[in-house]
RNA sequence: CGGGGUAUGGCGCAGUCUGGUAGCGCACUCGCUUUGGGAGCGAGUGGUCGUAAGUUCGAAUCUUACUACCCCGACCA
């Protein structure tokens, strides 16, 4: 990609509307633009990151045998009547009418649609267990959208649903998801905690949340030095009790309670038979007994994860992406006015690799080019300028780390090594 | 929904108290000079001051209503 042609509108001043660092940086680096409260355009840079996360999630879910589908965003009221949630859901369920005055809603989640899908198309227990997922835009008319895409009304979510003939089988798949989620978060280089949680409005028995640790997190987690597991402080608190009152108390699994803040990016539930019962999904088992299948549901906030990653990876200069997640990995900064075509030559050479590379061919000075690069968080800058002209050397300048001068023929080796180290 | 705040060119702001017909920085366009850490000089483009009504000879400024957006709380990936 050429910097002069790519749509990356940057903002120098801190946008007045943005409170937290990830929101500010996503606006400033040209990743997103607001359309309405909690509703955003994703521009090229933001979209690349979104897609990268999406693909990591997709790979790990495919690895545990989940199959990808795509369900509609607009859902008919009838399905929500079956599960009795049309009345239960509050105003965050955005209701709309079609031209025939029939009721629909914008899907905030898809238990109804998928249960209906499975009910109509699975006829035998021999087809279970079955796990389906989608990566799709959700709409929840949040009481108060905030922090940019961290809590948008429209957001990208991976939601998966599993169906089983018994709770043991459900538990097995639940554990598969649990480890898949850990792998996903590790691959995305996020520092996180698995957290015991309240299963909330979606309903069901057992649930755990995955929290990315960040100062600006909206959730307060109780942790202990002697346990891997954290607990959402909500679970430990009486009504109107302040979380800080928990500090120093006994942690349920030993040790003393400490508090940290987290951003909930994933949630896995064992729903049990709630939806299969209400929506009358049933199959005969091997003994000809009618059984309402056990269900699990598993969400990951893809768009929220973009913001969460930035919360963990930024400094005074801008975003400092992990090498794998950076929308642009290598930036070739041309300071030669392209007099000899050398920058384009290096750029073309790198472009043959799997790394996403940009050539900053704009008619700008070094200062602006490097500041922009630092703002959008490109891990590696390759500077073609006076060192090449004078000494035949090119400068490699990592976003974090020390600069170096290398010979042109060493470049490919340097890049390979640079991106191997984590 | 309760509490707090904001709305003036693309962005950040001043002007509002004390009414007199809109300004600054950045960005953008053109020219010349610059050229390794957000360049300098000069010349320009761009705003019916969130919307509507009212007061007044005259409203960005005063009054009323409305709308949008942000922050704190309850909801959630």
Image (tube, coloured by chain):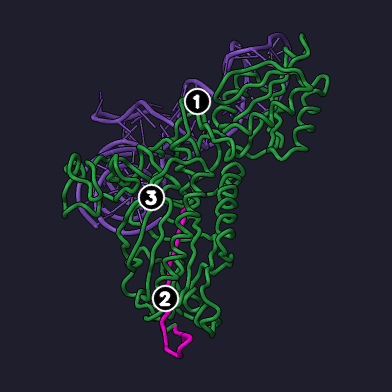
Tell me the colour chain A is drawn in: green
Instruction: Indicate whether B39 appears above or below A299.
Output: above
* Between A65 and A399, the one nearer to me in the picture: A65
**Could you say where residue A303 lies in the image, as x and y percent from the top left?**
49, 50
Q: Residue at x 48, y 35 (%)?
A: A25
Instruction: Where is residue A35? Give x, y as percent.
Output: 49, 50
In front: label 3 or label 1: 3
At mark 1, the secondary structure is: loop
Q: Which residues are magenta?
A: A282-301
Is A188 one of the magenta-colored residues?
no
- Indicate the colour of chain B: purple
Same subunit, labels 3 and 1: the answer reads yes
Q: Earlier in the sequence, mark 2 or mark 3?
A: 2
For residue A166, which numbered disc appears in the image?
Answer: 2
- Which residue is under mark 3? A194
Spatial distance from mark 3 to mark 1, Cα to Cα?
31 Å
**Residue receiving disc 1:** A317
């Amino acid at each position: 990609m050429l910097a002069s042609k790519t749509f990356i509108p940057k903002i120098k001043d801190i946008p007045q509307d943005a409170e937290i660092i990830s929101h500010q940086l996503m606006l400033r680096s040209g990743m997103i633009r607001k359309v309405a409260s909690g509703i955003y355009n994703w521009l090229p840079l933001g979209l690349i990151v979104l897609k990268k996360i999406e693909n990591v999630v997709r790979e790990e879910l495919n690895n545990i045998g989940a199959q990808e589908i795509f369900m509609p965003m607009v859902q008919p009221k009838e399905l929500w009547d079956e599960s009795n949630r049309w009345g239960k859901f509050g105003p965050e369920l955005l209701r709309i009418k079609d031209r025939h005055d029939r009721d629909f809603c914008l899907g905030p989640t898809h238990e109804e649609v998928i249960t209906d899908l499975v009910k109509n198309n699975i006829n035998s227990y021999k087809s279970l267990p079955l796990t389906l997922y989608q990566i799709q835009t959700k709409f929840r008319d949040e009481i108060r959208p905030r922090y940019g895409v961290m809590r948008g009304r429209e957001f990208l979510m991976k939601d998966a649903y599993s169906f089983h003939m018994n709770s043991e089988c459900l538990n097995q798949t639940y554990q598969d998801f649990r480890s898949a989620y850990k792998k996903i978060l590790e691959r995305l280089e996020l520092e996180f905690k698995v957290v015991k949680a309240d299963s909330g409005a979606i309903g069901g028995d057992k649930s755990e949340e995955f929290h990315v640790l960040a100062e600006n997190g909206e959730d307060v987690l109780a942790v202990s030095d002697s346990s891997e597991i954290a607990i959402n402080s909500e679970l430990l608190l009486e009504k109107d009790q302040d979380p800080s009152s928990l500090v120093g108390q006994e942690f349920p699994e030993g040790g003393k309670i400490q508090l940290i803040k987290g951003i909930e990016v994933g949630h896995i539930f064992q729903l049990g038979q709630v939806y299969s019962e209400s929506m009358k999904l049933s199959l005969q088992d091997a003994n000809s007994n009618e059984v309402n299948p056990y269900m699990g549901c598993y969400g990951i906030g893809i768009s929220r994860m973009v913001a969460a990653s930035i919360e963990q990876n930024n400094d005074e200069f801008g975003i400092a992406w992990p090498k794998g997640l950076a929308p642009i990995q290598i930036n070739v900064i041309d300071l030669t006015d392209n007099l000899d075509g050398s920058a384009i030559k290096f750029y073309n050479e790198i472009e043959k690799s799997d790394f996403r590379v940009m050539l900053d061919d704009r008619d700008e000075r070094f200062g602006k080019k490097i500041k922009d690069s630092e703002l959008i968080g490109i891990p590696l800058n390759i500077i073609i300028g006076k060192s090449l002209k004078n000494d035949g050397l090119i400068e490699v300048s990592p976003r974090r780390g020390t600069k170096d001068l290398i010979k042109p023929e060493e470049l490919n080796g340097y890049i390979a090594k640079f991106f191997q180290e984590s």
